Amino acid sequence: MGNTAEIKSAILNGQTSVGMELGSTRIKTVLIGPDNFPIASGSFDWENSYIDNIWTYSLDEIWNGVQSSFRKMTEDVKAKYDVEFTKTGSLGFSGMMHGYMVFDKNDKQLVPFRTWRNNFTGQASEELTELFDYPIPQRWNIAHLYQAILNKEEHVKDINFLTTIAGYIHWKLSGQKSLGIGEASGVFPIDSVNKNYNFKLAEKFDSHISDYGFGWKVADLLPAVLVAGDNAGYLTEEGAKLLDPSGKLEAGIPMCPAEGDAGTGMVATNSIAVRTGNVSAGTSVFAMLVLEKELSKAYKELDLVTTPDGHMVAMVHSNNCTSDYDAWLNIFAEALKELGLDVPKPKLYDTLLGMALKGDPDCGGLLAYGYISGEHITGFEEGRPMLVRSSGSNFNLANFMRVHLFTALGALRTGMKILTEKENVVVEEIRGHGGFFKTQEVGQRVMAAATNTPISIMETAGEGGAWGIALLAGYMINKKDGQSLPDYLNDNVFAGKSGDVLKPDAKDVAGFDKFFELYTKGLEIERKAVEVLK
């Protein structure tokens, strides 16, 4: 925003909003000014622990991280603007979605927090997907609850409240047991028309488990569902001391609905309107497309969640993206070092990845799989990275680099085909972010070829989910009467910031189609490799 004096005045007058996101490895806090852009931030690095076969974070770790991240943001304010941070216009919290946090009627935690990373709910996931005819991934809260029931865990009968990490923080700071609809959509299936839980499926669940004789109905355990723009309570006196033990922070700050990291990512990339989407591509790759209507059936390859304002979103998530070609580029770096050449890493990446644009449209008949780990979309529990070619393939450096970029999006394309061909989903533009797009034009052009959709890269995409939840907090207090969230973002945040848009090239699209045909046929080779290379 403006000069230091203007920022200082905005801070002193509470014309700011604060957003905090609890990610898997970092808790980040962002303070935004009246123009909606960050003016201060703080973060805290942490790691989950593996205790008794559970990936978890303790409540002490959670609060230590929350307080440290917030304190560092206030220290940043003091260092930059020489003022104490005591108030703000609004406040919001986000976190890694799903998992399992359950409490009894006395608000005591019944079992340690089970994060989204715990993949031991396979039976529950399969049975609920069949029961609901709706995709229930292993990481969803309802899958964790049902698995605990199947395992006959003693604590289940005592559950009074089930929530996520963002919902937990919000509850303790405001006293309200609620979630934003995007976060809630990863807890239990959502009815997108009524913008609430699908209570018919809740009744079906209760009927299914009736023989266990629990004294609760599942809907009674779940947080209330709110949509973007709703008031989700106020920071209590107790909550203010919990967030800021120094006692400087004033109570009474309005709080927006707690959201998940998927929703805040959509906000931060301005991809929450119907017919838009975003793709995050790095170690893994996932695309989120905002739907005009619900899908005709459940697909095990797809997740269904919602935007923070309640539109249904299809998510295609692939476990593997850049890791294999990163490994190949390390081999090239080793070779250069042995030859006595010192090439900086950015130059190595930009040069070699740039070669991909000089390759044959279909990679010259080369085939590769970057399956460092398993890939659920194509049906692999384990992976074996490999490069395959025939004697007639055009084997050169350009095609070598091109095939590794193409195959990084092979599984993603498998899921996208379901949406575009079986469900006729129309997407007018996809916003990209992540390491895959670092080399100018290359990742963007390959993604456009794989999705046959214009791809835009926005400078602000790197601000992340903490900024996204700060924007949602700002929207709650600054929106005009009847102003939708997409309109607010377009008019107040992203006006004039459309990003660098690249349309798909017809030759690239045809080339990717030809490569993908070979990729699909060649999965049998990958399957055999997993079997043989034990």
Image (tube, grey):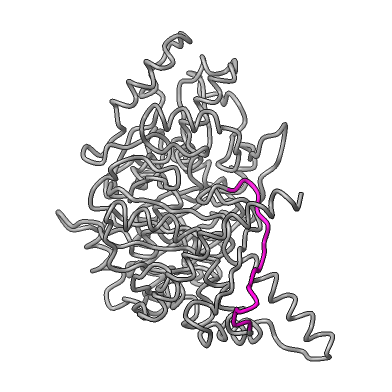
Q: Image quarter for residue 2?
A: bottom left
511 is higher (above) or lower (below) than 43: below
**Residue at 30%, 55% in the rendered image:** 290
**In front: 473, or 372?**
372
Tell me the magenta residue range: 380-395
131 is higher (above) or lower (below) than 169: above
Q: Image quarter for residue 353?
A: bottom right
**In front: 317, or 491?**
317
Counting from the top left corner in percent of width and height, residue 194 is at 22, 37
- Horizontally, is 463 left or right of 193 in the view? right
- Horizontally, is 323 left or right of 6 in the view? right
**Residue at 49%, 32% in the rendered image:** 126
Q: Is residue 356 magenta?
A: no
**In front: 376, or 347?**
376
Q: Image quarter for residue 405?
A: bottom right
- Horizontally, is 375 left or right of 309 in the view? right
**Quadrant into which the N terminus falls:** bottom left
Counting from the top left corner in percent of width and height, residue 125 is at 49, 33
